[in-house]
Amino acid sequence: MSISFKKPRQNRIFQHIVEEIQKAVLEGRLKPGDQLPAEMKLKEMFNTSRGSIREALRVLEQKGLIEIKTGVTGGATVTTPDQSLVTESLNLLVQSRQVSLNHLLEFRQEVEGAVAALAAMRAKPADIQVLNQLLKQARSLLGRAEANGDKLLKIDIQLHIGIGKVSANPVFLSVLRMVHENILNSYDWLALKSSYALNSNFMDMEILVAAIESGQIDRARQLAQDHVRKCHRYGKTKRS
């Protein structure tokens, strides 16, 4: 690997090391799977102490930019950025009540409305086929909805994320994954349990997919927002 870093100023050594390696990752000069030079080599490259190198590596690991392994074959390896740290932070904010569930409702309404509108604008026949296949799986389970509740909820998550994929916007897709796979999953009172709720949820998704398929942008946005409001109302009723 051929990579070089700027020498740090003495009064900001550790921050400089973090910034230089982070910049190399973000610019693609260091890619996921690449191994950083050994600590002693980094020490020479930055002309600094081993302690400063170790401190910088710890910060980079906390940011999720590298993974550090110990042992003979260990070292610091560049990782693929994921949403786990963001998800954990948002979860803590919700649990500490710095972000209320009304805030989450407002957030979901805007995001899921925008995602549904983009999906209606950009959907291809192959995309609709995937969504309809998920609806078909859900339909086959609705005869005994409560008994199949967990399976139906998994399909519901796949549908929401599937619509995110159709929107062709990786930022929106990442947010939907974070919300549906992690945040909402951790609140049992938001989960749909009754046969009525599960059937109602399925009907909402069926109508939404139909609007996306027919390219009804404004209708898809409105249906998605109405669906989010309905789910939160159900959760509040169940909680009280």
Image (cartoon, rainbow, N blue to C red):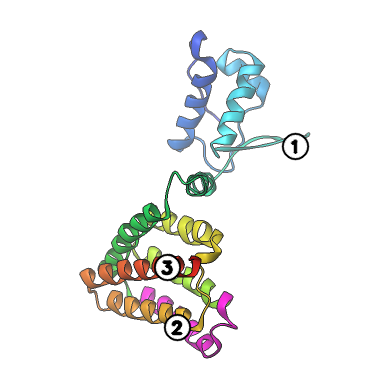
Among the two numbered marks 2 and 3 on one chain, the one whose residue lies closer to the N terminus: 3
Q: Which residue is mark 3?
A: 160
Given residues 228 and 158, the one toward you in this image is: 228
Q: Are marks 2 and 1 in contact (CB under 8 Å)?
A: no
Q: Are marks 3 and 1 in contact (CB under 8 Å)?
A: no
Tell me, for residue 199, which label it has, or none. Answer: 2
Reply yes or no: does residue 142 show up in magenta.
yes
Quadrant of residue 230 in the image?
bottom left
| Amino acid, disc 2 | Asn
Label 1: how many residues lie within 10 Å, few (<14), some (14-19) or many (20+)?
few
Callout 2 secondary element: helix
Q: Position of residue 65 (x, y in %)?
A: 54, 38
Q: Position of residue 163 (x, y in %)?
A: 38, 68
| Amino acid, disc 3 | His
Given residues 238 and 106, the one toward you in this image is: 238
Q: Which residues are magenta?
A: 125-150
Tell me, for residue 73, which label it has, or none. Answer: 1
Q: Main secondary structure of the magenta part?
A: helix
Among the two numbered marks 2 and 1 on one chain, the one whose residue lies closer to the N terminus: 1
Q: Nearer the viewer, mark 3 or mark 1?
A: 3
Callout 3 secondary element: helix
C-alpha gap between disc 2 and disc 3: 16 Å
Quadrant of residue 199 in the image?
bottom left
The quadrant of the rendering that contains the N terminus is top right
Callout 1 secondary element: loop
Tell me, for residue 98, which label it has, or none. Answer: none
Label 3: how many residues lie within 10 Å, few (<14), some (14-19) or many (20+)?
many
Among the two numbered marks 3 and 1 on one chain, the one whose residue lies closer to the N terminus: 1
Q: Nearer the viewer, mark 2 or mark 1?
A: 2
C-alpha gap between disc 3 and disc 1: 41 Å
